[in-house]
């Protein structure tokens, strides 16, 4: 695990020694692995240089990366996310590095296709389909079983139906987001989908209910098109999302099966 918080020394103060090598170069695998990968000064300079490059055009994404970097358990994933889009080219490496970050944030790299991220998990619940469906479909229950959700605002007072909209307030990677959704593909007691109609990531959540011996098999599928910070940090984002989807299903199972 690499250590040390960013000092911001790549700006007004300037880096020296190995930290300056990190700050002034794009990702060079040979340099990174054969001598400097475990040098905290080099790592500090390298990450600071990349984040400053991102921040020139996308200050919000730069700050998100800095916030995640402060969580020591996520630093290796931050490094992998940055390395995935940084290369060394002959000439002004600092300029290329900024351009590489900028291309990935804006999606202007013509050599890349839009990435569709998909996470799928399922679980069996020892309760009838009707009870499970009614509980999950009531979005006011989100904060009870989905850890990121802290509030829900429905645009309709009654039970939602296809075409209705609502907003979920969540915290993710230390940030607060308001995510508006529309109910689509609604088939009572079988499946439904919540499709985003705004927010930082186009996404949708699909729920399928299947009757099995003694209960219900619940399948939850999350799909999204990461952009901005989330596109650069896709490995980190996918890892956190998969863990969260699984944890949410286990919470749903525990809550429903605890009912009398």
Image (cartoon, rainbow, N blue to C red):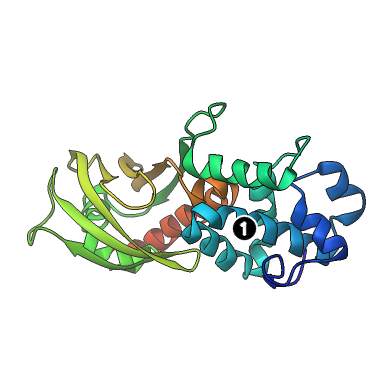
Q: Position of residue 243 (x, y in %)?
A: 53, 55
In the image, 218: left or right of 72?
Answer: left
Classed neighbour count for the residue bearing mark 1: other residues with Cα under 10 Å, few (<14), some (14–19), many (≥20): many
Q: Looking at this view, is 136 or 95 the one in front?
A: 95
Quarter of the image where one finds residue 156? bottom left
Q: Tag 1, which secondary structure?
A: helix
In the image, 96: left or right of 237?
Answer: right
Quarter of the image where one finds residue 210? top left
In the image, 214: left or right of 227?
Answer: left
Residue at 83 percent across and 56 percent down: it is 21
Q: Is residue 84 above or below residue 3?
A: above
Q: Position of residue 200 (x, y in %)?
A: 38, 52
Residue at 33 percent across and 43 percent down: it is 204
Is residue 253 visible to the viewer in this orientation of the structure?
Answer: yes
Where is the N terminus found, in terms of image quarters? bottom right
Residue designated by label 1? 51
Residue at the farthest right position: 35
Residue at 69 percent across and 57 percent down: it is 49
Q: Is residue 240 above or below residue 213?
A: below
Is residue 148 visible to the viewer in this orientation of the structure?
Answer: no
So how many labels did they put on this image?
A: 1
Residue at 60 percent across and 42 percent down: it is 99
Q: Position of residue 6 (x, y in %)?
A: 69, 70
Q: Is residue 3 above or below residue 116?
A: below
Q: Looking at this view, is 9 or 171 the one in front?
A: 9
Q: Is residue 48 above or below residue 54?
A: below
Q: Position of residue 15 (x, y in %)?
A: 78, 66
Where is the C terminus found, in terms of image quarters? bottom left
Q: Looking at this view, is 89 or 235 the one in front?
A: 89
């Amino acid at each position: 695990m690499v250590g040390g918080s960013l000092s911001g020394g790549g700006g007004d103060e300037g880096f020296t020694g190995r930290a300056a090598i990190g700050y002034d170069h794009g990702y060079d695998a040979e340099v990174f692995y054969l001598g400097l990968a475990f040098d905290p000064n080099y790592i500090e300079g390298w990450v600071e240089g990349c984040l400053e490059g991102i921040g020139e055009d996308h200050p919000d994404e730069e700050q998100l990366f800095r916030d995640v970097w402060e969580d020591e358990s996520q630093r290796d994933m931050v490094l992998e996310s940055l390395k995935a889009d940084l290369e060394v080219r002959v000439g002004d490496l600092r300029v290329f590095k900024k351009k590489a970050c900028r291309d990935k944030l804006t999606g202007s790299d013509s050599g890349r296709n839009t990435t569709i991220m998909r996470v799928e998990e399922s679980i069996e619940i020892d309760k009838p389909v009707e009870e499970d469906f009614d509980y999950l479909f009531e979005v006011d229950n989100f904060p009870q079983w989905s850890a990121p959700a802290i509030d829900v605002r429905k645009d309709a007072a009654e039970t939602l139906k296809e075409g209705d909209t609502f907003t979920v307030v969540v915290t993710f990677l230390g940030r607060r987001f308001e995510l508006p959704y529309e109910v689509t593909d609604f088939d009572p007691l079988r499946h439904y989908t919540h499709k985003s109609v705004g927010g930082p990531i186009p996404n949708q959540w699909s729920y399928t209910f299947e009757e099995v011996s003694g209960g219900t098999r619940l399948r939850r599928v999350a799909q999204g098109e990461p952009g901005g910070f989330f596109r650069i940090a896709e490995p980190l984002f996918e890892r956190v999302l998969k863990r969260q989807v699984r944890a949410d299903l286990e919470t749903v199972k525990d809550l429903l099966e605890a009912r009398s």
